[in-house]
Structures are given as C-alpha cells and as structure tokens.
Image (cartoon, helix red, strand yellow):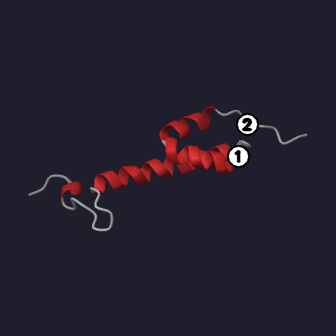
Amino acid sequence: MELFYFNTFPELAAIGLPLSVVVMLLLHCLMGLLAAQLAHRKGADLGGWLIWGMIGGTGALVTAFWLPAQSTEK
C-alpha cells in the first residue's frame, strides 16, 4: 500500500512531470500572481511585476510586501 498520495500518480501523461513537481510549479506561479496583484494595488507596473512574479515566486511576494505604496496625487 502506498503511503503518499503523490506516489499513486507518478507522472502526468501530458507533460511527463511528477505530480509533486507540477503542484509546486502551480503554487510558485500562484504566489507570483499574488505578488503582481499586490504590487499593482500599491501603484507599481503590473506587466513588470507579472514577469518578476513568474520568475521569482516567493521572492517576488516578499518584495511586494516591502514595496511602499505610491501616491496617486500629481
């Protein structure tokens, strides 16, 4: 009997990666999207933060939390 859920589906047929790797990649990208949304709400460029979020993941989320809010007054 298998003890871990990830061992029951060792590979995904479409891309050939273990399920645990796919889950970790999806969580990484989700953190990147959250970082981009947070930075955009603070007044930063959404496009640049989407790229940084997809590459950086957790690091981008931490950086977005430290980002100061920009004023919208001119």
Residue 68 is left or right of residue 71, and the answer is: left
Within 10 angstroms of label 2, few (less than 14), some, or many (20 or more) residues? some
Residue found at x 66% / y 51%: 47
Q: Residue furthest right?
A: 74
Residue 55 is left or right of residue 45, and the answer is: left
The quarter of the picture where residue 1 lies is bottom left
Q: Helix or strand or loop: what does disc 1 sit on?
A: loop
Q: How far from the left and from the top, in percent, is residue 25? A: 40, 51
Q: How far from the left and from the top, in percent, is residue 40? A: 68, 47
Which residue is more in the foreground, 73 or 54?
54
Q: Helix or strand or loop: what does disc 2 sit on?
A: loop
Which amino acid type corresponds to the residue marked 1 in the rendered image?
Asp
Q: Nearer the viewer, mark 1 or mark 2?
A: 1
Which amino acid type corresponds to the residue marked 2 in the rendered image?
Ala
Residue annotated with mark 2:
69
Which residue is more in the foreground, 34 or 29?
29
Residue found at x 22% / y 62%: 9
Residue annotated with mark 1:
45
Q: Residue furthest bottom?
A: 14
Q: Is residue 69 above or below residue 15?
A: above
Q: Is residue 66 above or below residue 30?
A: above
Label number found at residue 72: none
Pointer 1 with pointer 2, Cβ within 8 A: no
Whole-Å distance between the Cαs marked 1 and 2? 12 Å
Within 10 angstroms of label 1, few (less than 14), some, or many (20 or more) residues? few
If you read the primary sequence from the N terminus, does the residue marked by circle 1 or circle 2 appear first? 1
Residue found at x 71% / y 42%: 42
Q: How far from the left and from the top, in percent, is residue 54? A: 52, 48
Residue 11 is left or right of residue 29, and the answer is: left
